[in-house]
Image (cartoon, helix red, strand yellow):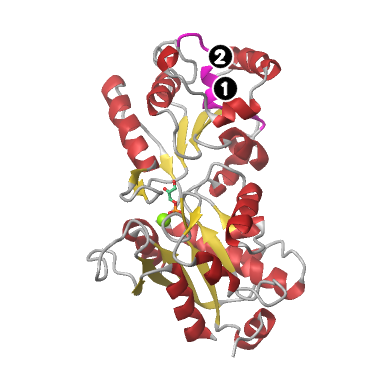
Amino acid sequence: IIRSFSQLSSQSTPDAFGIAFDIDGVVLRSEAPIGGSPRAFRRLYDDSGNLRIPYVFLTNGGGFSESKRALELSSLLGVKISPLQVLQGHTPFKQLVNRFENELIVAVGKGEPAAVMAEYGFKNVLSIDEYASCFENIDPLAPYKKWITKQVADQYSTVKAVAAKDLVLSQRVQAAFVVSDSVDWSRDIQVLCDILRTGGLPGRGIGHQPQLYFAHDDLAYQAAFPSERFGMGAFRIALESIFNRIHPHALEYTTFGKPNPFVFKNAELVLKQLVLSLQDKVQVLNPANASHNFKTLYMIGDNPAVDINGARQAGHPWFSILTRTGVFKGKENHAEFRADLVVDTVEEAVDFILRREC
Ligand code: G3P
Ligand code: MG
């Protein structure tokens, strides 16, 4: 018998449960649904398409705003997903708005990194594409690059370029945010080193290093190719190795994303908020004060060092489920980061949870 979400949550508090889904290697590979994910998600809704099981996406990936990502996931998976349910690697960058609201900052990565930061409230943000284009000859390899990134093609305008150029020449960059995977490692490493070694004004002498933030530190992730692809952690290693050879002080930076336990704590707060907003049909302003407690929160992931390690470090009430559709391809459990359960697919994971809980 499958009870409705409201029955589940009112009858079973504090025995209620929630689910956090990793995306790459669990739900999607590139943009293709995998592991029976559309079927698995449909089971989390009632016949009228209303959510009956509280869940969020907990991905290190990103590059688009939470609202855009929610729309994209809704159309790929065939269910109604709200932006509140989308927690990306860069989502915690919001917390830094007070510090850098009016400072010049640079946003790096695929997709629309500057639009993401602007939506969070940063007022003086340029993408690294826009920033680099203000400096003639900053990338000596540019004449050999026959391509143009989607972001430049979509958003670039002469007016913006002129405004950006004045801004760049008069202000130091106070922070660089690596929002999503770098598209052009050679140009981005060059320009970031220029910013970081000069105190935020490329072409000048050595200065105090501006802040540097990474949305996550994944060495590799599962995309469409059969074996893993280098992730933001690999880019960080490349940037750090080069910076440390050209600068007297080692690179300083902060990384967000899984496996940091605070990411799991935040997911728990958002799930509480989701439960309460669905119960009351009103937005709960301070989820930290909510009295709702989960008995179990399930993390379904494909990366033992990231998803499973993170859930284990977060402790109670997290229960980790490792799938075989992504980074992990072993037969048995992972030797170092042992999951509470290993299954083939996300559909199997959801079956297990619903059998156990309902
Ligand atoms: O770039 C994305 C990747 O590093 C991880 O995504 O969904 O597996 O956390 P995900
Ligand atoms: Mg993954």
Question: Residue 157 appears in which quarter of the rendering?
Answer: top right
Q: Secondary structure at mark 1?
A: helix
Question: Does any portion of residue 356 appear in the rendered image?
Answer: yes
Residue assigned mark 1: 130
Question: Residue 254 appears in which quarter of the rendering?
Answer: top left
Separation of residues labelled 1 and 2 (CA atoms) = 7 Å
- Residue farthest toward the bottom in the current orientation of the protein: 1
Is residue 3 covered in magenta?
no
Q: Amino acid at mark 2?
A: Cys
Give coordinates of residue 21: x percent, y percent: 49, 63
Toward the viewer: 174 or 5? Answer: 5
The image quadrant where one finds the C terminus is bottom right
How many marks overall?
2
Toward the viewer: 265 or 4? Answer: 4
Q: Secondary structure at mark 2?
A: loop
Q: Mark 1 near mark 2, Cβ–Cβ under 8 Å?
A: yes
Residue drawn where x is 55% and y is 37% of the image: 111
State the mark number for residue 134: 2
Describe residue 151's horizontal placement relative to residue 240 as left or right.
right
Residue drawn where x is 50% and y is 65% of the image: 37
Question: Does any portion of residue 125 appear in the rendered image?
Answer: no
Q: Amino acid at mark 1?
A: Glu
State the mark number for residue 261: none
Describe residue 219's horizontal placement relative to residue 92 as left or right.
left
Neighbours of disc 2 within 10 Å: few (<14), some (14-19), many (20+): some
Give coordinates of residue 179: x percent, y percent: 51, 39
Residue drawn where x is 36% and y is 67% of the image: 322
Neighbours of disc 1 within 10 Å: few (<14), some (14-19), many (20+): many
Magenta stretch, residue numbers: 123-137
